[in-house]
Image (cartoon, rainbow, N blue to C red):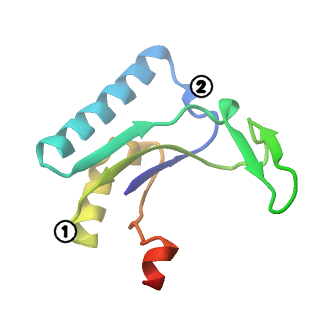
Amino acid sequence: MLLIIEPPGQRATRTEAQGREAYASMQAFGDSLRRQGKLQAGAALASQASAVRVSGVNTSPRVLDGPFSEAKEMVGGFFMVDFASLDEAVALAHLCPAAQWATVEVRALAPCYEDIQA
């Protein structure tokens, strides 16, 4: 998985034209991954301003509406991809246009707890 980690509020600093250009470059990157048969899913995520955090174990849920002032970064989107190796994943992450304005984090998926116990 490629996670796009960006500073909160960064999108608001772009002009409309810059935002459209960034979006088009990410669409082209996703289309390229799809043509290569590597893309499973991908999406941009809305700003933290519309996010809600829920926490609480064995208590009433604690709900906190965004934006989250303590956040120094946010997940701005993701590409769920198939890679043959970590080297391939890193190479493609480097080609991701978001690497120019954000951090692209490469993460492997792990089995669920139940799968580990079997």
Q: Position of residue 75 (x, y in %)?
A: 54, 47
* Residue 71 in the figure: left or right of residue 21: right
Q: Position of residue 17 (x, y in %)?
A: 42, 16
- Distance from label 1 to label 2 (Cα)? 36 Å
* Residue 74 in the figure: left or right of residue 67: left
Q: Considering the image in quadrants, where does the N terminus appear?
A: bottom left
The residue that mark 1 highlights is 84
Q: Position of residue 40 (x, y in %)?
A: 27, 48
Instruction: Tell me: residue 97, above or below residue 3.
Output: above
- The amino acid pointed to by label 1 is Ala
Residue ID at (74%, 36%): 66
The image shows a total of numbered marks equal to 2
Residue ID at (28%, 63%): 89
Q: Residue furthest right?
A: 59
Q: Determine whether the residue tagged by mark 1 lies in a helix, strand or loop.
A: loop
Say whether marks 1 and 2 touch (CB < 8 Å): no
Q: Based on the displayed image, in which of its 4 quarters is residue 57 positioned?
A: bottom right
Residue closer to the observer: 101 or 92: 92
Residue ID at (32%, 44%): 41
Sequence-earlier tag: 1 or 2? 2
Q: Position of residue 113 (x, y in %)?
A: 51, 75
Q: Residue furthest left?
A: 36
Camera-side mark, 1 or 2: 1
Name the mark on residue 48. Answer: none
Name the mark on residue 12. Answer: 2
* Residue 9 in the figure: left or right of residue 110: right
Residue closer to the observer: 75 or 90: 75
Q: Considering the image in quadrants, where does the C terminus appear?
A: bottom left
